[in-house]
Every structure is written in C-alpha cells, then in structure tokens.
Image (tube, helix red, strand yellow):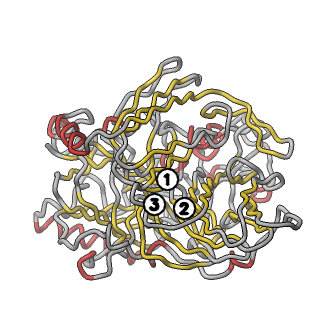
Amino acid sequence: MRTQHTRRAVLGAGIALAGTGILTACSSRTDEARSAGNQGAMNHDDTAHDGATRKPSSPAKSHGEYVSPDGEEVAAVEAKRGSGPVRKVQLTATPARLDLGGGLTVPSWAYGDRLPGKEVRITAGDTLAVTLANHLPQPTTLHWHGLHVRNNMDGVPGLTQPGIKPGAEFAYRFAVKQSGTYWLHPHLGVQQDRGLYAPLIVEDPKEPLSYDKEWVVLLDDWLDGVEGSTPDGVLNELSKGMGAMDHDTEDMDHGSDNKSGSGPSRVLMDARSRLLGGAASDVAYPYYLINGRIPKAPTTFTAKPGDRIRLRIINAGGDTPFRVALGGHRMTITHADGFPVQHTTTDSLLLGMGERYDVLVTAGNGVFPLTALAEGRNMSALALLRTGGGAAPAASVRPKELDGQLVSAFELKADKAVALAARTPDRTIRIKLTGGMRLFDWAFDHTMYDPAHRHPVEAGERVRLEFYNITEMWHPVHLHGHTFALAGGAGPRSVLDRAPGARKDTAVVLPNSSVAVEFDADNPGLWMLHCHNVYHSNMNMMTVIGYRR
C-alpha cells in the first residue's frame, strides 16, 4: 500500500449510480442503525450515503483507544498459540532477470532469481521465522496472505510496520496454527505485480485426505519488463482515468503509446465476463503464466495413470480473474482459501485475485492441458499434466471443461470441523464499494484511505461485514488476519438460518450486488480490509478494521 496518496478527485454528483436497489437498501439500513443507536450497526458515519464525497473525519476514538500492532493484547494471543519447532527461511528481494520460457527473459524484481519464489512449506504448529533482506531500490514488506498471524507481523507499511528500507532486513516470526494453501507477497504499492510472490503451504499433521502426488499451481498475469512496461507505469496511466484518455478503444487494446513513458498502453477497455457480471479487468497483460512460464513453454507435471493428485491452485495475479480447468478431468473441491469444505465435484473453477482452491483429480492416461483462461479475454495460461505418451496440446488449447459445470464459492459448504458456529452478530459494519473505470477512483464509501480511520470492533464479538457493490465491476475483497464465513447476500439473514458457508478470507462481490460475511474477532490489532485488485487498492479501495482496547 502507498503511504502517500495521489488520488484524483472522487465521484461527483454528475455520475449516475447503478444498482439503486442496493443503494436504497444500504441507506435505509444505515438510517435504522443510526436511529436505534446500536453501536454495532454502523461505524462509518463520517461518510455520506447519498453519493456525495467527503474526506474522513477523525476516528470515533483516539488512537490510544485501539490495540496497537505490538500491544500486550497481541502478545497474549500469540502466547496462547504456543511455540512449536522453528522453521527458518531466508528471503532476498532483489532485481533479477527472469526466464519466462520460449526465449523470453524480462527484468523484474523477485525473491532470488526464480519465479515464483521458492516454496515455503511448514507444518501447522510450527513457528515460522523468515528474514527478508531488501536489495530493492525502494522499501518493501512481506504479507502472509490468509494466515492468522500476530498483528505486527502482517506486513502492511504505515499500519503494522514501517517499510523495510533498501539495504536493510527484517525478521518476521510468528506461530502458525492453521493448515492449508497460502502465499506470500509484498504489501507496498504495486510490487506484487512484479515477481515478488511465492507459495506458502502449511501441512496438516493429521491430514485426512488421501492422495499420491501434490501439484502447487500459481496463476499470474505478467507485463513487468515487457516492451518497457512496469506496474508503476500502468498505475500512473490508469490513475488518470479512462475518461481522460484521448486514444480510442482499438488503440488501447493493441498497444498504442501511453503518456507515462513506460511502454505501450496497457489499458483494457473491452474485457467483459458474463460470469462476473460486466467488466472483468482493467489491464491488458501481454502474458499469462502458470508457475512462471508462458503458454509456449509450459511447465509439465508428471504422474502415473490412476494417480490421485492434489492441486493447490493460487491466483497471484494483480488484475486478472482466471477460469481454470484440467482437460479430460473433473475436479473435486476439498478446500477454499485454505479451509476444508464439503467435497464438491466440478468441471472448472473461477478464481479472483488472492483466492485459492485445493482440488483432487484422478489422472487419466496421456497428456492433458491445465488451462487458466483470463476471464473476459481470449488469452490463457497453460501447464501440462503428463502421465503417458503423446504430443502436447497447442498453447491455445481450450478444453471443453472450461465451459462445463462451474461451482462458485457461494455454493460450497464448510466442512463440519471448521464451520462457524451459529451466533447472532454483535456488530454489523456496512461498506459500499464505489468508483468506476472512467475516473479510476475506486474506494470504499467514496472515501480516501486513511490508516487513522478505523471501523472499530471488540475482542470476542461476532462481526458481520456487509459489502454493497454499487460499481459496474466485480471486486475480490480480502480481510487480513481472519477467516470469515460466507453468509450470502447482505440483509437480515446470517449463518444462523442457512447451512454454514465456506470459510474464506477473500470474497468476490459482483457488480450491483451485495455480499455478507461473518467472523469472530479473535485476533487483536489493526487489520487491512481491501480489494485484492492491486490497482484498485492503490487508488483507495482499502480500509482498516481496528480492535478497541
């Protein structure tokens, strides 16, 4: 996240807002909450709900009223987690030339000289000790996406720690109690859209699944170092707003020169997705990768016919939703965002940025494409599963399973072992997702991000978050330090009157719709809540959940 904010003027009165039903519902519930004086109903009273824009006022309580990232409350919860075997890891963030295959090498930043970074694998109950040496020309951090870490190890500059300066290093150390599929990446600016990411796998010492092999799959969208493009240049171009650009849609989609001085235009205007209800992406990436390789030179995973394979699929992209299928196979979903779900079979998956799914497949005999279609674009990433002889499919292969059954996260049910217990929420926080592509003024509640402005919660509460998306684009919303239960659309219903929803930390909110999630406030500190589109969050689509003392 940026510590300095250069956001353009936010929404004006002249912009029409879609989804009036959602706006009406949000406004009416807000008025009811205020008249009732319920402390848990609305915690964002400084933001208008009439479409106007207002800068945030001071938090309701002084900063001393909130748990600090290194406070005694944080230390007490960490002590309860215990201290298991220490797993030490050394990482170096450094400029590097990366080989993407097919003769394509690009300058970028990475952990060492590889893409993705070397896998970090530990066992639940371990203490993870990672030292990050920063050899980059600017500060950086590490964020442990999906893990319930102690707050001062969460890696958000300006909120939980200072950025690690060039030439310096920082020692992260925390207990890890949960198993599952996670990943690590920086949380400063658009650094994540370079090569700075790696899988983080936490094994279950009592693993209930039976399988023969494991395949960790990282999906990514790539532009860094291609024809002079950089993520910072793309952010600069996007931040001017698409309505202010003087080149037409055809030029944008085919690489006209932009005004940022960092390569061809990467603005994408016509990526539409029926599954996502409208615009799918903002950025025209030249390549899509699986495990750091372009489709012309894919990685190959080898197995034997009949092997039962566990795929851990991670969307590490900056701006791209991927629809994923393994040609000739159906997949059984076993986990969502690291937490087990009731097993469900599907042909394909749709992953927003930051989402993870674990699936089981029984391998057939031959060579099969694992295709990740960039939703809304006729481009894809590719890897191969080889169990026998035969020619590899073409880079452009589109297995029929991509158009077969697709199970969404909202159709999944939590495994009984991790289902959130039924309980009436103590506090409800309602947030509007606002902005648009024309001004590129993405935000929560039309409000500029201010780390001093917090949505207060208290330890021990059941908290309900209601997201009302009044934009024309989907958003993957991610909460740090917690795993919530999907509770369907926003409104009066909760986990009390429906089958327990899947446990996740990243939820897709479609345009002109609403989503409710619920979590237990059991990890004190100051926690980021943001859209996991790295360009949206950098334009202010982020806020803070703060525990009161």
* Separation of residues labelled 3 and 1 (CA atoms): 14 Å
Q: Is 95 rendered above or below residue 201?
A: above
C-beta proximity under 8 Å, tags 3 and 2: no
How many C-alpha atoms fall within 10 Å of the one at disc 3: few (<14), some, or many (≥20)?
many
**Residue annotated with mark 2:** 352
Q: Residue 234: in sight, yes or no?
A: yes
Where residue 494 appears, as percent x and y from the top left, is: 27, 75
In the image, what residue type sits under mark 1?
His
Where residue 240 appears, as percent x and y from the top left, is: 60, 45
Disc on the earlier residue, 3 or 1:
3
Disc on the earlier residue, 3 or 2:
3
User: Residue at the location (23% across, 41% down)?
Assistant: 58
**Residue annotated with mark 1:** 532
C-beta proximity under 8 Å, tags 1 and 2: yes
Using the image as rendered, state which of residue 459 and residue 339 is in the foreground. Answer: 339
**Residue annotated with mark 3:** 337
How many C-alpha atoms fall within 10 Å of the one at disc 2: few (<14), some, or many (≥20)?
many
* Separation of residues labelled 1 and 2 (CA atoms): 8 Å
Q: In the figure, is residue 76 to the left or right of 50? A: left
